[in-house]
Image (cartoon, grey):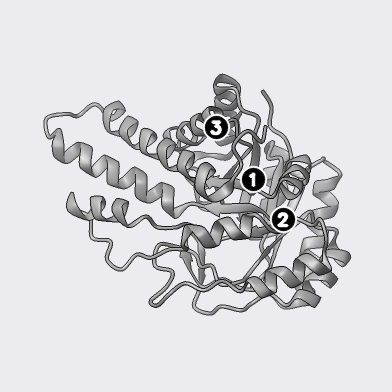
Amino acid sequence: MSLINTKKMFEKAYKGGYSIGAFNISDLEQLQGVLRACKEKNSAVIIQASKSAIEYAGINTLVAMVKAASDEIGVDCALHLDHGPNFEMAKKCIDAGFTSVMIDGSHLDYEENVAITKEVVEYAHSKNVSVEAELGVLAGTEDDVTSDVHKFTDPDQAVDFVNRTGVDSLAIAIGTSHGAFKFKGEAKLRFDILESIQAKLPNYPIVLHGASAVDQEIVATANKFGGDIAGAKGIPVEMLRKASSMAVCKINMDTDLRLAMTASMRKFMAENPSQFDPRKYLGAGRDAIQAVVSEKIDIVLGSKDSL
């Protein structure tokens, strides 16, 4: 099997009315759990790593691990840089073997965002690598990405941005949020903004960040076995499925995998206090991730049999 870019993936997803799951990983168990679920469901998949995950695992180790696991499990996938902070980081990932990168200039002045995105696009396209950018700002915290404000994406500005940069996909802000503590009240997504962008940019792939559902049963399990995750709340799955049937071709999910792995490992350790073999509790975490990803494919993404 091989690492591929996202171009044909997104073309099929847009026409098919489904999204491709983009799952953050930083270790072998997370990676295997995701890929095993996608093999089981015959689903396209994007494996992504943030700057902090790359620093944790090592960039060459990470690339080699994804290539080896993809080949052994039998699933083609894209390897994507999530929230690349600058041109240098994007170039480093491209040169190391990533097939897709995100340059996140959403915190910059608009013209600065255009300029840095265009710079990354020019280099990436010369290497047959896809590029994602972001317009608008998501509130919340996840890894190194933090914001106290939320700024919705302007549809007309999105058109200008795509035309001027040549970027392959665009992450937009319509009400999702990073991390496990997304809302104090009820979740609300601005589907009117998504519909407007879809009308103005037909057949163009849109990305949703901060789209974990934060399953309350998993949170309860983590808390039951020693966790302290109070007030965690995510995006209702029916809202995510609606978005994936529209222009959204990529949905990012990180928090849901972290919660599933943590809850299952806490449970295993509490129920098996004499067990000290890391393969046992890490294996429980891997199985939990596989189950979550499998469920996402069925009820959120709609990407079963998309390979």
Secondary element at tag 3: helix
Total count of labels: 3
Image vertical order of residue 269 relative to residue 252, above or below: above
Of tags 1 and 3, the one toward the viewer is 3
Question: Residue pushed farthest top?
Answer: 72
Q: Earlier in the sequence, mark 3 or mark 2?
A: 3
**Residue 68, quarter of picture:** top right
Mark nearer the N terminus (1 vs 2)? 1
Numbered mark located on residue 103 in the image:
none
Q: Secondary structure at mark 1?
A: strand
Q: Which residue occupies 85% across, 72% down?
A: 160
Q: Quadrant of the N terminus?
A: top right
Describe residue 301's horizontal placement relative to residue 222 as left or right: right
- First in sequence: mark 1 or mark 3? 3
Q: Dot 3: within a 10 Å radius of its alpha carbon, few (fewer than 14), some, or many (20 or more) residues?
A: some
Three-letter residue code for mark 1: His
Mark pair 1, 2: CA separation? 9 Å
State the image coordinates of residue 249 (x, y, percent, origin top left). 68, 52
Q: Which mark is residue 80?
A: 1
Mark pair 3, 2: CA separation: 26 Å
Q: Please tell me whether mark 2 sits on a helix, a strand or a loop.
A: strand
Say what amino acid the circle numbered 2 marks.
Glu
Q: CA distance from mark 1 to mark 3?
A: 21 Å
Read off the residue under disc 2.
Answer: 132
Q: Residue at x 23, y 44 (%)?
A: 266
Within 10 angstroms of label 2, few (less than 14), some, or many (20 or more) residues?
Answer: many
Q: Quadrant of residue 138?
A: bottom right
Residue where numbered disc 3 is placed: 41
